Amino acid sequence: MNFSILWTDKISDMEDDKILNEEHLPEVEKTKGDKSAVDNEGNIQMHKPFRILRTILFIFISLLSALFLLVFILYFVPVLQEKISGKKNEITNNKDLKQDAAYKKQIGLLTKDIQRLSRKYNAYTSGQSYIVINTIENKFFLYKNKNLIREGF
């Protein structure tokens, strides 16, 4: 009888000592499968595969963000600037514009350029038969006296 009382007292003392010792040690709770642990500050400590996966995901999201920023700067900023400025080139049929001296001068210069380029084109093309081959579209065009006679692939 004395032995059983001493034994139970010894066990309870050992349990009390264990509880006291655990209070002084940093808490680390392990979950099933040892996949992660929580330290005494509540931070999750992951094992190596999860840290690698998290790092890869972080790098992927960073690259995706950088790509989005680049696309935004290259494409959307000029569109927004055009929208904000309100400047848009439109063909108008304004009578006052057609009577403006600078407008008439510009139209005259463009007409002269078109005539000069037409003469140059005519000099390069002969009046006889010739063939034009478009290698990009794999097409040919057969001309005779500057008239299209035949086209094909």
Image (tube, helix red, strand yellow):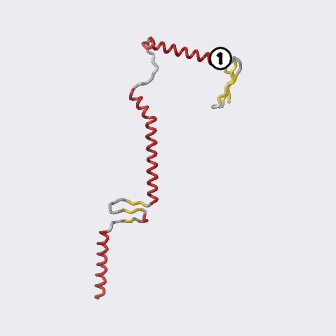
Q: Position of residue 5 (x, y in %)?
A: 28, 85
Is the residue 64 above or below the residue 41 in the image? Answer: above
Q: Which one is in front, 57 or 8? A: 57
Is the residue 55 above or below the residue 138 in the image? Answer: below
Q: Name which residue lies at 45% across and 11% down.
A: 101
Q: What amino acid is found at the position of numbered circle 1 in the picture?
A: Ala
In the displayed structure, does residue 23 sit left or right of residue 30? left
Q: Position of residue 80 (x, y in %)?
A: 41, 32
Q: Quadrant of residue 86?
A: top left
Q: Which one is in front, 93 or 41? A: 41
Is the residue 93 above or below the residue 46 in the image? Answer: above
Is the residue 131 above or below the residue 14 in the image? Answer: above
In the displayed structure, does residue 106 sit left or right of residue 120? left
Q: Position of residue 153 (x, y in %)?
A: 68, 30
Total residue callouts = 1
Q: Quadrant of residue 28?
A: bottom left
Secondary structure under tag 1 reads helix
Q: Residue furthest right?
A: 129
Q: Quadrant of residue 152?
A: top right
Provide the residue designation for mark 1: 123
